[in-house]
Structure formats: structure tokens, C-alpha cells
């Protein structure tokens, strides 16, 4: 694997020099990842079948020439997508990870992470853990919706620790990988190898832990793995799409352990953070995208960072393919499919409650409850107001979604928010932001 990485990095320099423009290189070549050398085949990987087709059509000869220059061999160049990767063998080796076997994305580092109000605490906690593993917060539990940067922060922690001490045994896996390897170890009578792999490490990062909630055997094994690592003063970092108390069917003993350390949430980025994310990508990749287009994207894509950056890539790719300058008009055309898809998404009372709860850092159950503290009552009134504004349902039906409240309570909430909106500019901004998030989901 090291050999193909060295060859590909050298080939990239040649390709970049011979590319027609920096935009072409960043859009089409930079996303390619070296996979393996197999006989006379030099195999590369790209995530999107659309990109694969375009690369084979336009850039294959350039890639082949560059690889021939650096390897002094006339390899057959094969480009595969994720869906063409071979299945995991039934009896895979369970080697203890080293710094070269961590499946980490080299782009996911702290310096490329854009910090904003929505993720400041999670970023600070991640950096503290990276600087002092098993001393600051153990475990560190990061949660938030998909595409908000949890995986980026987890990889950043791993990279930071390995940069300081390459001999540290760091392992990043998804909960799905953990489960599959556990099943394989049981089927092949390799339980000891499995436990040796996961318990003889210094740092364990496990992504999307919510997926083990309905798997009793996986929860049992992870419980013992967690205990073994924690008792040995090893760092554990966990991510989920929700806080521990909201992961249904998760065993209480695991839930309590997840709450031992620090729980930090990541929310959808606000407008300023979305602009900062786009500007960083534009500057880093030298993309010909102006402020007006970035503002258009930031106002149009509000739900998560993955969609935000994907929209930017799509616009640049469309401009390159059609040989046009990036403009608002071009951006609207390039993203029309996304807008049509989002327009067809059905908004429900629960959708509104989830977005409002996430925005105010409370739980959906709080909004639906009879709790009366201001930090809960006010978001509840906003959610009722948005249900009335965005949904074509009656007041009694709205009340039913909020703990079976009377319709007069809904009338009061709507009236109160409407009056406040007339004199409170900050509330106007809050409502506008919430509406964008609701419509953007």
C-alpha cells in the first residue's frame, strides 16, 4: 500500500502540472484515491460513478502517462467506485492496528475544520482529548445529525495523536465494522484475536454507535471492550446521531458509561459558518467562485456540511463541463435537481419539533412535555407557530402533537410569537433560520 501511495503522489504532481487549469485538477483528479496494484493493473478508486465515467473519458490517457513516467511500467489503469469494491473476506485477519493501518482520511485534520457557534464546544473538546488522551475527557461522546463534522473531528483527533507519537496504537472503526468483525470472529472461532485487536490499543474511535442499539451481542462485547480500555486508562471517542439518553434499546449500563466523560453536540451550521466553510474550500482548492455565489449556496443549503460542499463541487463541475463562468444563474441550473428534491420532501410536526429542539439544544421530548421553564416553553411556542405557518393542519391537530394540548394553547403560542416578531429582529432571524433548516432537511 505504501508503494502505490508513493507512485500516485508522484503522478499527481505530473498531472497537476499538465492539467489545463487548477479547477480541472481539483474537481476531477484530486478526489481519486489509490486502491492497489494487482499484476499489470494499477487500480484507482473514486466514490461517484458519474466522476468515474468522466475521468475515463477525458483524463485516462493523462493518468496513464503520468503513472508510466513514475513507475517506468505500462500499467493498465482501472478505476473502480465504492460499489465495485470486493466484499470483505469471510475470514479476515484481525491484526492489531498501527499508525499505517487506521483508515483515516488525510483531509480530516483540525486545520481544515471550520469552527463556528454550532460546533465550538465539540471542537474544543476534541482538541483537548487529542492533546491529552485519557486525561481530559474519557470517553468523549460527540453527537449530531449526519454530515455535520463528527467524523472529521474523530479523524482529526487520530491524526493529531499519531503526529505527536506515531507509535501510538490508534483504531478508528464504524460500529458496523465492529459488529461485522465480531460476527466473523464468532463464526471462525477467533474471539481471542478479536478481543486482542480491540483491547490492546491506546485510542479507540468508534463512529455511529447508535447502530449497535438493537444488537444485544454487540452491546455485550462492546461493554467489555469499553471496560477493558477505560480501566487501562486508554482513550475512547464515540459518535452518534443523538445523545446517549435518546438511543432507544441501548443498555443502561452502556448508556451510563457513555455519560462518564463529556458529551458534546454539533448542530447545523449557521449562515456565517456556512459561508466560512465554503470560503475555506474555495481558497484551498483555488475554485473560481465569487462571494455572491457562495452566499447563494449558503442560503440554499442549510441542513449539513456534506450537502453544502457537495453543492459547491457540483456547481464547479457543471461550469467546467459546459465551459461557462460560475454565476448565480449557472448555480441555480446546476442545483435545480437538489431544489426539486427538497421541495418534494414532506414537512411534518415532528420534523419541525426536531429542528427546533436541535436549534435550542433541548430534546423533542421536552417540547412535547408539560415542562414550563422558559428555555423549554419558548422553543415549544416557536414550534407551534411554525406548525401553524408551514403546515395545512388544524389547531387541534397541532395541539395533539404537543402533548395533546388544547387548541387555545396553540392560539396563544402563535399570537405571542407573531407579536414578538414585529418588534424583535433577532427573533425574526431565528425564525428565518429555522424555516430554512426545516425546508432544507
Image (spheres, rainbow, N blue to C red):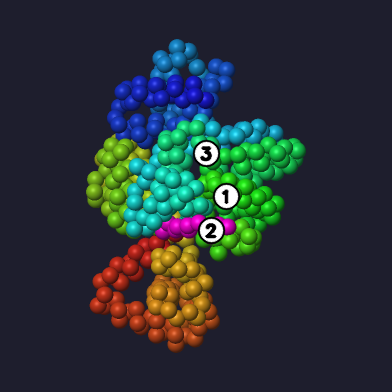
Q: Quadrant of residue 68?
A: top left
Q: Quick one: label 2, few (<14), some, or many (20+) residues within 10 Å?
A: few
Work out whether residue 333 can be spotted: no
Depicted 49 relative to depicted 264: above or below: above
Residue extending furthest toward the top = 72
Depicted 312 relative to depicted 382: above or below: above
Counting from the top left corner in percent of width and height, residue 331 is at: 32, 48
For image coordinates 41% across by 84% down, the residue present is 411
For image coordinates 55% across by 17% down, the residue present is 40
Residue receiving disc 1: 230
Q: Quadrant of residue 6?
A: top left
Counting from the top left corner in percent of width and height, residue 392 is at: 45, 75
Q: Which residues are magenta?
A: 257-267
Q: Which label number is shown at residue 170?
A: 3
Q: Which label number is shown at residue 260?
A: 2
Residue 264 inside the magenta-drawn segment: yes
**Along the viewing direction, whichever of 327 and 115 lies nearer the viewer:** 115
On the picture, is 75 further left or further right than 221? Answer: left
On the picture, is 230 further left or further right than 61? Answer: right
User: Mark 3 or mark 1: which is in front?
Assistant: 1
Counting from the top left corner in percent of width and height, residue 230 is at: 57, 49
For image coordinates 40% across by 19% down, the residue present is 66
**Along the viewing direction, whichever of 369 and 312 lies nearer the viewer:** 369
Whether tag 1 and tag 2 are in contact, CB under 8 A, the answer is yes
Question: Label 2 to label 3, Cα distance in Å?
Answer: 21 Å
- N-terminal label among 3 and 1: 3
Counting from the top left corner in percent of width and height, residue 430 is at: 33, 68
| Secondary structure under the numbered disc 1 in the rendered image | helix
- N-terminal label among 1 and 2: 1
Residue 119 inside the magenta-drawn segment: no
Amino acid at each position: 500500500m505504501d508503494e502505490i501511495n508513493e507512485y500516485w503522489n508522484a503522478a499527481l504532481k505530473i498531472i497537476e502540472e499538465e492539467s489545463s487549469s487548477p479547477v480541472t485538477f481539483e474537481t476531477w483528479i484530486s478526489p481519486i484515491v489509490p486502491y492497489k496494484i494487482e499484476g499489470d493493473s494499477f487500480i484507482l478508486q473514486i466514490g461517484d460513478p458519474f466522476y468515474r465515467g468522466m475521468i475515463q473519458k477525458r483524463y485516462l490517457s493523462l493518468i496513464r502517462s503520468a503513472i508510466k513516467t513514475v513507475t517506468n511500467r505500462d500499467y493498465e489503469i482501472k478505476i473502480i467506485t465504492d460499489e465495485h469494491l470486493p466484499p470483505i473476506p469471510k475470514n479476515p485477519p484481525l491484526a492489531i492496528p498501527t499508525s499505517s493501518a487506521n483508515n483515516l482520511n488525510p483531509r480530516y485534520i483540525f486545520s481544515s475544520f471550520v469552527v463556528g457557534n454550532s460546533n465550538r464546544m465539540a471542537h474544543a473538546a476534541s482538541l483537548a482529548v487529542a492533546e491529552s488522551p485519557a486525561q481530559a475527557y474519557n470517553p468523549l461522546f460527540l453527537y449530531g445529525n449526519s454530515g455535520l463534522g463528527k467524523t472529521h473531528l474523530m479523524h482529526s483527533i487520530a491524526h493529531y495523536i499519531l503526529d505527536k507519537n506515531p507509535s501510538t496504537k490508534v483504531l478508528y472503526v464504524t460500529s458496523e465494522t465492529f459488529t461485522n468483525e465480531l460476527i466473523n470472529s464468532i463464526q471462525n472461532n477467533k474471539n481471542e484475536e478479536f478481543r486482542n485487536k480491540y483491547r490492546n490499543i491506546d485510542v479507540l474511535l468508534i463512529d455511529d454507535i447508535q447502530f449497535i442499539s438493537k444488537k444485544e451481542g454487540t452491546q455485550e462485547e462492546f461493554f467489555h471492550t469499553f471496560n477493558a480500555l477505560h480501566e487501562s486508562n486508554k482513550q475512547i471517542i464515540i459518535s452518534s446521531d443523538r445523545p446517549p439518553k435518546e438511543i432507544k434499546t441501548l443498555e443502561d449500563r452502556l448508556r451510563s458509561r457513555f455519560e462518564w466523560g463529556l458529551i458534546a453536540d454539533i448542530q447545523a451550521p449557521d449562515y456565517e459558518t456556512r459561508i466560512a466553510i465554503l470560503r475555506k474550500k474555495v481558497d484551498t482548492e483555488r475554485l473560481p467562485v465569487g462571494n455572491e455565489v457562495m452566499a447563494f449556496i449558503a442560503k440554499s443549503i442549510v441542513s449539513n456540511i456534506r450537502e453544502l460542499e457537495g453543492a459547491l463541487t457540483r456547481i464547479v463541475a457543471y461550469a467546467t463541463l459546459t465551459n461557462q463562468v460560475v454565476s448565480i444563474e449557472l448555480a441555480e441550473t446546476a442545483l435545480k435537481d437538489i431544489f426539486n428534491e427538497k421541495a418534494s420532501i414532506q414537512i411534518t410536526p415532528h420534523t419541525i419539533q426536531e429542528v427546533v429542539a436541535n436549534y435550542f439544544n433541548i430534546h423533542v421530548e421536552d417540547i412535547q412535555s408539560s415542562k414550563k421553564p422558559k428555555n423549554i416553553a419558548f422553543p415549544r411556542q416557536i414550534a407551534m407557530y411554525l406548525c401553524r405557518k408551514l403546515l395545512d393542519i388544524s389547531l387541534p391537530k397541532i395541539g395533539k402533537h404537543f402533548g395533546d394540548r388544547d387548541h387555545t394553547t396553540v392560539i396563544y403560542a402563535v399570537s405571542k410569537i407573531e407579536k414578538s416578531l414585529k418588534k424583535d429582529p433577532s427573533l425574526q432571524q431565528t425564525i428565518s433560520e429555522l424555516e430554512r433548516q426545516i425546508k432544507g432537511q
